[in-house]
Amino acid sequence: MKHIPNLPESFSPLPLHAPAEANDLLQWVVRMCGRRVSESLDLRAEALVLAGSMARGEGSVLRTENGWLCLSDMEFMLAVPDARRLKQRKEAVRVLTEQVTEEAASRGLLCSFEFTPTRLSYFRTARPCIFASELCRHGQVVWGDPSLLQTMPDDSIPKIDALYLVCNRMIEQLAWRTRICDDDCCQPDSLFAYSIVKTYVDLGTSLLIFADSYESTYARRAERLASLRDSAAGEIADFDVLLEKIAANSLLKLQPTQELLDPLPKDVALNRWAELARFVLRVWQWEVRQLDNGASEGRAAEVLHFARSCSPWERFRDWAKLARSAAMHGHLADLLRAPYFSGAPRNRLFVEAAVKYAKLASLESEFAFARSNTGSFLPIRSGVELSLEESVAEIIRVWNVYFRNT
């Protein structure tokens, strides 16, 4: 059995300004996860890496009457030699997640844990993106080879990845609206308010990348927000208001308060959702325009170009990835009506999400692309006409199955 090393002194899965009690508990929980992984024969992992805001010391944790509540997920990467024994490893991950969740709760920490099996080769060949850059700079090897992350490339982040960050948050907000509008829901749970905070913060992250002013921590990003005033002022409506909201929510992310746990009536939640939607779509449309670089005429044409533009190699690669994922998840029937020769599947899905996002927020008058009659951009089609609600459900399903963690 491999030795579980002491965590390095720099290791600090601690939210800014949190009491030492919370830090001690988080330290214990992380070590407990390392011990569980090292003892599991079914996982066959070679290392455990803590990623995300917890690894950066920027997780959001609040004291409640039931103990400590982690608003941030605790994200781990399970370094595995290959993708074989997928079903057995998947079951082992499920068991592990249940065990550590229960053990953490018994110590007074309520937290959502995520363990993602990751090939060892990823740490040498990861493509440039926000996640890989932050993992390289701030990831923590909890158990295994302490030099694992030193092999990671730390290249500049392409602007398309910044746009994809906005797209992913957009689909998460579509899912939240579905939950809020559920007939059985009188008011959303506290994580909805936190999702609003995260989305505003990530709008700032994405804009900073487009302005070549990216920083790898929330704290330093908040300090750089002023540099954005010249990048999109006059091109994004109410840009100063947006920057104020990004700044306020960045502070709330770093120093969460009890207001995040206060219940919101359904109508108040929907109003906040719609207000956020307007800013998300403004940023999304502006970034699509920057990537288009004047190649198209008009807003709708820019969006259409984004959905369909990619090289033959990129198109082949992305559809091949989708087909492989469909086979792994037993969803090969999804591919029967796929529009293989019309753009990259991920871009098509994101455009479809933006159109439906605008319609649900009643923003067609502001965003021309939501009014254009260009048909469905879903990369996977059922062969039947879908209602607006059914289309949103399909967008969320396809994203969860094929694109969420890729």
Image: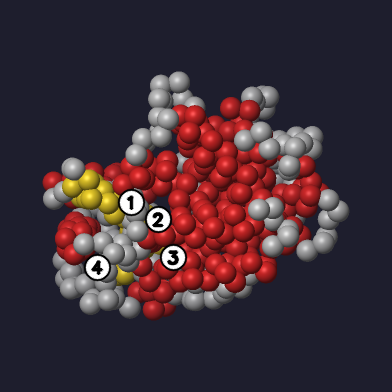
User: Could you tell me which secondary element the residue under label 4 belongs to?
Assistant: strand
Which callout, 2 or 4, points at the residue further toward the start of the chain? 4
**Residue corresponding to mark 4:** 143
Label pair 4/1, CB-CB below 8 angstroms: no
Q: Is residue 406 visible?
A: no
Disc 2 and disc 1 in contact, CB within 8 angstroms: yes
Q: Residues within 10 Å of mark 1 (few under 14, many from 20)?
A: some
Give yes or no for contact between labels 3 and 1 (Cβ–Cβ under 8 Å).
no
Give the residue type that dot 1 points to.
Thr
In primary-sequence order, the first of circles 2 and 3 is 3
Q: Mark 2 = which residue?
A: 252
Q: Residue at x 53, y 71 (%)?
A: 224
- Residue 239: quarter of image: bottom right
Dot placed on the residue nearer the N-terminal end, 3 or 1? 3
Q: Residues within 10 Å of mark 3 (few under 14, many from 20)?
A: many
Earlier residue among tags 2 and 1: 2
| Residue at 35% in and 74% down | 148
